[in-house]
Amino acid sequence: SNRAVPDWKEAAVAPSFIGTRVFDIPLEELVDFIDWMPFFNAWEFHGKFPAILEDDIVGEAASNLYRDARAMLDRIIDEKWLQSKAVVGLFPANAVEDDIVLFADEARSEELATLHQLRQQRQLPNGQPNLCLADFVAPRQSGIADHIGAFAVTAGIGIEKHVAEFEGKHDDYNAILLKALADRLAEASAEYMHAKVRKELWGYASDESLNNDALIAEGYRGIRPAPGYPACPDHMEKTTLWNLLDVEKNVGIELTDSFAMYPAASVSGWYLAHPEAKYFQVGKIGRDQAEDYARRKGISLATVERWLASNLGYDAAAA
């Protein structure tokens, strides 16, 4: 297969611990990690932050919104409206074909979990490889002691009470503002924890020093792909993540029947550390891969087709 073959000469770095840890994140430490542009996008403002505040046309409206947001953010922090928590797991791992197998310890004999991945199938220009996240974890037969991380963070603990208070006063503006800020704080929590993982907990980039703009531009080593997003579009894989990290017990995020996270202001995913690891879109897959994926996961093809409907490059109904 036309897989990516990263350079494994650089030694894989062993993390500072194996297993799971829970963190309370002080909200005031998250302010500098906030990416404000998606906040403005949610209110139909488009452009770049902070330039948008000076924009000839929307500058005044954007500035008013930003002032309200910063004032509410101060209250959220001072009055402890919300709580941010994270659970992080670091595990020995190796790739087996298109799957990533996690192990209980460095003996690598007891398998903890298997993360099932999908591979790009479309013809790519200039002989580019067809990517799969498993390509960025050292293959089992390489003998390289590689690792993978997993995380779930939320900044939505405590939000319901305050949203209900605003809605009880028919104050939709502040209810929406609070939800939008909680979303930004959740993303900031993910950014904050990823930096902590890179620099300390896993420590493969211990000398990193990046400002917020560089973080937003993802100018760091490694990625944090989330189940349900283009590189790993299967939302069902969140179940594996939840079991692996005992997410509900450790940080109180529930998975709904449709694999949505509750509270909504939550982020979860995997940490991959290889310098060549990058985000990509799996895109459309053929029936052959859908069948192979169902076999690997031990589920029916119909279930795969239901949850990956938008990734099917064939007509499932015409079977």
Image (cartoon, rainbow, N blue to C red):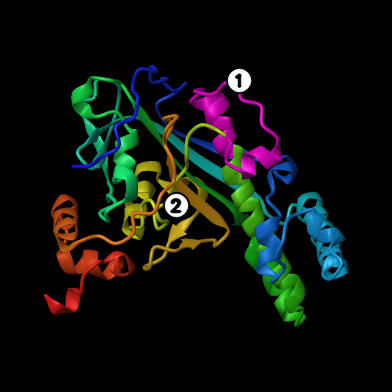
Q: Residue at point 53% right, 29% down? A: 198
Three-letter residue code for mark 2: Glu
- State the extent of the magenta-drawn residues as a range: 193-219
Residue at disc 2, secondary structure: helix
Residue at disc 1, secondary structure: loop
Three-letter residue code for mark 1: Asp
Q: Disc number at residue 248?
A: 2
Q: Is residue 195 magenta?
A: yes
Q: Residue at point 19% right, 73% down? A: 316
Relative image position of residue 144 (x, y in whole percent): 28, 20
Q: Which residue appears farthest toward the front when viewing the image?
A: 126
Q: In which quadrant of the rendered view does residue 113 lie?
A: top left
Q: Is residue 122 left or right of residue 291?
A: right
Image quadrant in which the C terminus is located: bottom left
Does residue 313 show up? yes
In this rendering, the answer to whether 218 lies above or below 161 is: above
Q: Which residue is mark 1?
A: 207
Front residue of this view, candidates 123 and 5: 123
